[in-house]
Amino acid sequence: MPYEPDDSRAARRARRLRTLWHLCWGAVALLLGVALLLFAGIGLILVPDQMAEERAYQAARPCEAVVTVDCLRSVQATVRDTDIREPSKGGKTYDLLLTGPGVPRKVAMGGAEPLLRHLRAGDVVTVTMWRDYAIAVGKDGVTQDSVEEPGGLSLLATNMALAAFAIGLFAVYAGGHAVARAPRYAATGLPERLGKRLGQTFGAVGCVIPAGVFGMWTGPVGVIVLWLVLVGVLLVATRERDMPGRRVRAAVEESVTAFGEEVAALDLNVNGPDATPAVLKEYRAALAAYDRASAARREPDALTALRDGRAAMIRLDARLHGRPVPIDALPPASGPGRQQPLTGTGERYVYTGRNSGETEVLIDRPEPGRPVLVEADATRGDMEISFEIKTMTRTEDLTKTGDTLVHALYEYHGRRYLPADATHLRVGAWSGRRWSIRVAPLSAATALAPEHRGHGDEVLRYNGGPAVLTVQFEQNEFWKVRYVCQCLRSRSACDCRLPAWPEDTPGDNDWSVEAYDLRDGRNTLRLPRPGFLVIDCFSRSWYLTTQPVDIPPPAPPGLLGRFGPRR
């Protein structure tokens, strides 16, 4: 077993314990929430029966010739004892204990006056009954009402059911999220939105009080209607308080949702050996950025949070796979030196800007660690000031400026080949220019046709075998066409076997042709196998033709035959 530092083992043990804790309290909260929701549902189901009972009680009259359970009947009973405990003596109880047929053994009176305090054991009293309820007790012309009449039970049940519903809903939400995301909570702590939902739950429970008071005149239906209205106002008010003046386009919200799905789909075991402190730091930064983007008050804030979150995801992926970790050249979101707000919709692999001077873009590659296509567009500026894109390598261990991908004085549209070692693009745009950059995998390159016409910088995908490419340009100014092998290595590093070209094959094995002030703007290039063509000509038109070369396959090992050489 490999050696692990004590602090690393202790950190993983602590994360496992935190994960278990979140699983346990989440499961308990989930079960409690389900129980409360069932209680609320059953309580609301019983409310109509309680309302019918209250209406029947309010319509009850003293029994006449025929005695029924729905009339008010008088029953004689004997007092066994009284239980009076005043609040100053440690309790508040006013119970009358009775004996006799058809009467309850204990009646809650609600107070000691005017009758209860004067009763003694053995006294005979008259109990007014309605169904199973002892409504009042009388003796010698003095009557005292009990507190056991059915009036108000439906309101009480409705209020309790609504409060239980609000608490149960929050418990199911919090417990379900804790169970499903226990490892994430163990690594990053409870999210801020959980506290906001708890505050909304307390507010919803508090709304039961004014709704219950209103229900004294309208009944349970009025309680439910007013409670729903108050809770709706509460949700709208808290949402507006959290996000005043929120104006975020649907496209940006879709980008935020997509980023949340990217984070949720991340295959990271926070208790595993790969979950180093640096990895967990990037993971927390991505989660925090998603929370910021979801709660952003303004669109630029959402875009900035998306940018920071995707930067954290890029660094996280680099750390997990052992690649150089790029750094973000921009100051943090709260720093005073932060560049002007980002533009666009926050779509992944797309970067936009306008008249922003020099801006560095951290490259998010569809296939991390592999070359990509960079499709750039720029409008004409107010002045003839160039639009530039340069490659940068800016990691924790290395900083260097690479090649210039684009240099244009006017409007520009083209696609460029970006090698795997670049981590940033430095974009220079002035004088009112608008620009956009889209990063795509090399598989998105257009396939080279036998006769192919085009204009401007381009990257083409070649799928054929050995062939000769004829290159023609409309002007004799600078242009360059180079071939990139399918192994994506440079000419000097490629160890792919070269074809046995016939001696009269045009071109050479340099893999590139270029022209500086050539008169005819024409040349040939050998294509040994499938790969890519990188055309560098700014805005000139070009014409490419390919002619396959018939090369016999190399002789198999054992030139003298499959039976080996003769002895």
Image: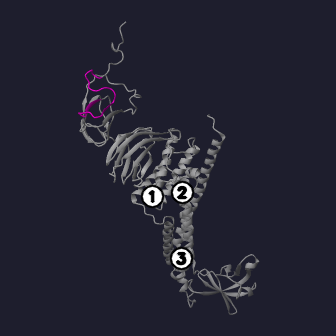
Q: Quadrant of the N terminus?
A: top right
Nearer to me, 305 or 214: 305
User: What residue is shown at x 56% (from left), y 79% (from top)?
Assistant: 213
Nearer to me, 341 or 517: 517
Label at residue 190: none
| Image height of 245 relative to 520, above or below | below
Q: Amino acid at mark 1?
A: Pro
**Most distant residue in the top direction:** 567
User: What residue is shown at x 71% (from left), y 78% (from top)?
Assistant: 92
Q: Amino acid at mark 3?
A: Ala
Question: Few, some or many C-alpha atoms within 10 Å of disc 3 (few <14, some 14-19, many ≥20)?
Answer: many
518 part of magenta stretch: yes
Residue 561 location (% of width, % of height): 33, 14
**Most distant residue in the bottom direction:** 141
**Mark 1 lies on residue:** 300
Q: Amino acid at mark 2?
A: Gly
Q: Quadrant of the C terminus?
A: top left
Q: How far is disc 1 from disc 2 in space, using C-alphas?
A: 32 Å
Residue 234 location (% of width, % of height): 51, 70
Q: Main secondary structure of the magenta part?
A: loop
> Answer yes or no: do the residues labelled 1 and 3 have beta carbons within 8 Å?
no
**Mark 3 lies on residue:** 211
Nearer to me, 291 or 221: 291
User: What residue is shown at x 39% (from left), y 40% (from top)?
Assistant: 404
Q: How far is disc 1 from disc 3 in space, using C-alphas?
A: 41 Å
User: What residue is shown at x 56% (from left), y 70% (from top)?
Assistant: 205
**Mark 2 lies on residue:** 176
* Part of the protein shown in magenta: 501-525
